[in-house]
Image (tube, grey):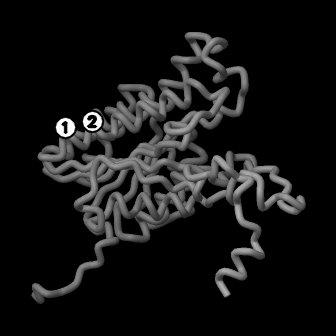
Amino acid sequence: MNKNRVVDPFRLDGEVAVITGGSRGIGRAIAELYAARGAEVVICGRNETVGERTAAEIGGSVRFIRADVTCEDEVQALVRSVVAEFGSLTVLVNNAGPTDLLHSRDVDGPIGHISLENWRRVLERTLTSAFLPSRYALPVMLDQRHGAIVNISSLAAAQAMPGFDTYSASKGGLEALTRSIASGYGHLGIRCNAIRVGSIAVDHGDGSKRRYAAEDDAPDAWRRAVPPPEGQPADIAHAALFLAAPASAYVTGTVLPVDGGLGARSLMPWQTPRPEMLERMDG
């Protein structure tokens, strides 16, 4: 065997990955990429019909296991099934989130108007949904002294999103949990990182995709603090591949922004140079 053989640091051969909320959108994109890079992939979700169809469409060794990641018994059963079938669990992507709840303005809102019941619902689906899979995946990873956890966070953890107070608090908690896991388990071979997601054009199941309604052809559009174009699920998948692969072996406890520059939006848009000025400078 050639000891000098170069190994692709972005391959996932030998890894067994569980992706929560993997039936569509960002989760599906991650599952497709992980499978293409050599991992054994298990996606989970609450809708068995959609999940089985997604697994069949991706093909290869991708398998769907139904699980509600806010239910402790179902998460335990998920982990047991993965280990029984594949012998290990080395990568966990906590992607499942409360997209259906956030579409309803009756659930989240300003802190002075949120009911305790809805506060708990969003916390469960955003934060508990990452705690439980991590809680039960960690013992398996510890036995192997090898594992990577990737949490899917949001720009809401770092910048105000009025009207999404519970969601913002949950994502802030998720990033804090990321650092705690990285610090507490790093010496045992476990890495934990998060991706802070901006605006992604995601199919929510009915074929429609949320998009900004910025007036791009307005005369002063260049000047206004309009958001950048929306990203695609593949943009997040590539970041998730990096954080799970050997390429990021020295990366843990970090929050990687993949937001198209939303986190760096100008506070003084009136000072933004006109496009033609920049073109002259480039020339």
State the mark number for residue 184: 1
| 17 versus 101 height, above or below | below
**Residue sitting at x 88%, y 62%:** 217
| 142 versus 30 height, above or below | above
Three-letter amino acid code at disc 1? Gly
Which quadrant does the N terminus fall into? Answer: bottom left
Q: Position of residue 240 (x, y in %)?
A: 42, 58
Q: Where is residue 212 in the image (x, y as percent from the top left)?
A: 76, 50
Where on the picture, by quarter, is residue 134? top left
Relative horizontal placement of residue 227, taking residue 186 as reference (left or right): right
Residue picked out by circle 2: 180
**Residue sitting at x 31%, y 52%:** 91
Mark 1 and mark 2 in contact? Answer it, CB < 8 Å: yes
**Residue sitting at x 70%, y 33%:** 103
Q: Position of residue 21 (x, y in %)?
A: 51, 44
User: Which of the pair 254/174 is nearer the observer?
Assistant: 254
Q: Residues within 10 Å of mark 1 (few under 14, many from 20)?
A: few
Q: How crowded is mark 2: few (under 14 residues within 10 Å), some or many (20 or more)?
A: some
SS label for mark 2: helix
Three-letter amino acid code at disc 2? Ser
SS label for mark 1: helix
